[in-house]
């Protein structure tokens, strides 16, 4: 990094000015002298070149012969004229040195005539001084908001073309200035400055999202964490972050950062419509990251934002009814099972039954079957021509759905009976053979929905545990009955322990009295 001003390590504002100047006006690189390019050979006169080449060869031969003659003469006259030989050798050496200096001078002259490259023309110190003359007073006077706007925002295009390290350094300093502004933003003017700076930063960092994506996302997240937890600007920033991740295929980077979203919605005091949009955006992030079940949970959170509205108001919100239909469809297609009554109890889902669209009513009826009815009810529903076409249109596979309904039916029977006869299962599951019953029970056991053992000799299954399909009044009464039974059992155990303890104490006391009487008898003797 080029330094154009005297830096103070304790003054980040001055460091920021110098950093920006070095990015905008890099110093010109040193130009190394290059050897002159050889002249192109003239192809139109090959014969002349050949003649010149032969003449040069003859001259070289003559020089070599002269050198040999001189060497012989020097050998003959070595004893007689040593000084004369040394003078000749020195003259020859000086001649070669002069020729080399002449060649170097010609090379430098050619280099001076060469036109400088574009890179060499960029970055004149005079331009840097002009920029510094504008920014330095802002740094020295502590006008940090203006310094960010004039130093960073006014030159954002060039800054974002710098290296990742330089971009990070510039924004780190901007963030440190913003922290100081936040600390002093008790007045309305300071708050306005923070809002303006944060929104402008978000705007610049989300432009051209495909370029330096991870660096920009990292800076946006840093800015998000810099703001107070209750700041509404966090909502604005988080929406920008999610939209950028969706648009650049980097949703997986944020998929694990949504666990606190519901808490943030409360801290930011969002209106229901804004909360719903944010939840749906989070659902899109998770769906894009191949986390369908987590995405479905956020869709339900979005549907709960209309719980305070009346049915008439919800029916006017086409996007909410569409969302409810989409969530229910995804739930029914999913291989997982949950208590469907929690879904059926959502107001938006309930409005599907009164919707003007036939497919909404069909979907609501199918959810009712999944919630509390059996395989027979599903077979009746799917046998209707319109319903059969409806199932195909929404992508529900008949055989897979029937298998799922049968497992749910076993859950319902298992919650009421500890032993279930094959004959009862055949009737409830609409099966014809014992082998089909056993296959269906094994499927339910493998899925984890039921813990049971098959007794082939007595043709019954012994149920240990089932996954409840729903919780209604009867379900709560069953739980209450079981709790009462456990309470009575514990009470009986405690009573038995107390009786045993009392009996042991009595026996110990009787033995103690007997020993005392025996000791008295021995004393009398």
Image (tube, grey):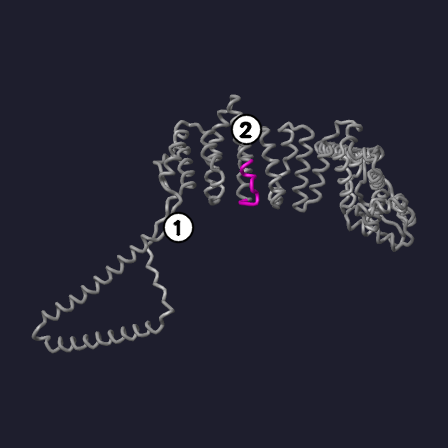
Q: Which residue is mark 2?
A: 195
Answer yes or no: is residue 489 visible: no
| Depicted 241 relative to depicted 98: above or below | above
Residue 85 or residue 99, whichever sits in front: 99
Quadrant including the N terminus: top left
Magenta-tinted stretch: 203-212
Answer yes or no: is residue 17 visible: yes
Residue at position x 71%, y 39% from top?
297
- Please state if 370 lies on the left or on the right of 23 as rendered: right
The spot of residue 26 in percent (x, y) is 40, 43
Of marks 1 and 2, the one in the foreground:
1
Residue at position x 53%, y 43% from top?
215
Residue at position x 90%, y 47% from top?
383
* Residue 210 magenta: yes
SS under mark 2: helix
Q: Are marks 1 and 2 in contact (CB under 8 Å)?
A: no
Q: State the residue lying farthest toward the left.
A: 80
Quadrant including the C terminus: top right
The spot of residue 446 in percent (x, y) is 78, 51
- Please state if 339 lies on the left or on the right of 58 as rendered: right
Q: Which residue is mark 1?
A: 117
């Amino acid at each position: 990094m080029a330094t154009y001003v005297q830096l103070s390590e304790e003054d980040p504002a001055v460091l920021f000015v110098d950093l920006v100047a070095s990015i905008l006006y890099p110093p010109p690189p040193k130009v190394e002298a290059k050897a002159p390019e050889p002249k192109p050979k003239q192809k139109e006169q090959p014969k002349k070149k050949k003649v010149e080449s032969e003449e040069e060869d003859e001259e070289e031969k003559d020089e070599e012969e002269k050198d040999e003659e001189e060497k012989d003469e020097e050998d003959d006259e070595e004893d007689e004229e040593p000084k004369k030989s040394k003078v000749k050798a020195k003259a020859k050496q000086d001649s070669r040195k002069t020729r080399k200096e002449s060649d170097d001078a010609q090379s430098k002259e050619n280099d001076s005539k060469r036109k400088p490259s574009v890179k060499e023309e960029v970055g004149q110190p005079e331009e840097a001084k002009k920029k510094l003359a504008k920014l330095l007073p802002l740094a020295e006077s502590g006008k940090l908001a203006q310094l960010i706007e004039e130093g960073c925002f006014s030159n954002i295009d060039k800054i974002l073309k710098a290296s990742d390290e330089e971009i990070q350094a510039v924004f780190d300093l901007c963030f440190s200035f913003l922290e100081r502004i936040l600390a002093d933003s008790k007045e309305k003017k300071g708050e306005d400055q923070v809002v303006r700076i944060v929104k402008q930063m978000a705007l610049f960092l989300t432009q051209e999202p495909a370029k330096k994506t991870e660096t920009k996302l990292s800076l946006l997240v840093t800015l998000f964490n810099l703001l107070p937890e209750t700041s509404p600007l966090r909502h604005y920033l988080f929406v920008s972050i999610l939209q950028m991740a969706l648009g650049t295929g980097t949703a997986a980077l944020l998929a694990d950062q949504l666990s606190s979203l519901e808490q943030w919605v409360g801290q930011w005091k969002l209106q229901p419509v804004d909360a719903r949009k944010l939840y749906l955006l989070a659902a899109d992030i998770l769906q894009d990251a191949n986390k369908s079940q987590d995405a479905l949970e956020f869709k339900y959170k979005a549907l709960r934002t209309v719980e305070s509205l009346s049915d008439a108001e919800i029916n006017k919100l086409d996007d909410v009814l569409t969302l409810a239909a989409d969530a229910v469809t995804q739930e029914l297609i999913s291989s997982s099972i949950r208590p469907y009554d929690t879904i059926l109890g959502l107001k938006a889902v309930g409005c599907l039954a009164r919707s003007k669209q036939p497919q909404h009513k069909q979907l609501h009826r199918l959810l009712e079957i999944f919630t509390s009815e059996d395989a027979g009810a599903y077979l009746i529903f799917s046998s209707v021509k319109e319903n059969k076409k409806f199932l195909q249109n929404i992508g529900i596979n008949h055989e897979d759905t029937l298998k799922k309904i049968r497992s749910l039916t076993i859950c319902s029977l298992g919650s009421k009976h500890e032993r279930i006869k094959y004959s009862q299962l055949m009737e409830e599951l609409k099966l014809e053979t014992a082998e089909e019953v056993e296959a269906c029970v094994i499927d339910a056991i493998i899925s984890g929905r039921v813990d049971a053992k098959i007794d082939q000799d007595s043709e019954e299954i012994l149920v240990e545990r089932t996954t409840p399909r729903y919780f209604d009044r009867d379900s709560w009464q069953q739980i209450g009955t079981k709790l009462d039974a456990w309470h009575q059992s514990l009470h009986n155990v405690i009573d038995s322990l107390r009786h045993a303890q009392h009996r042991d104490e009595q026996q110990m006391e009787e033995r103690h009295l007997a020993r005392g009487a025996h000791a008295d008898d021995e004393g009398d003797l």
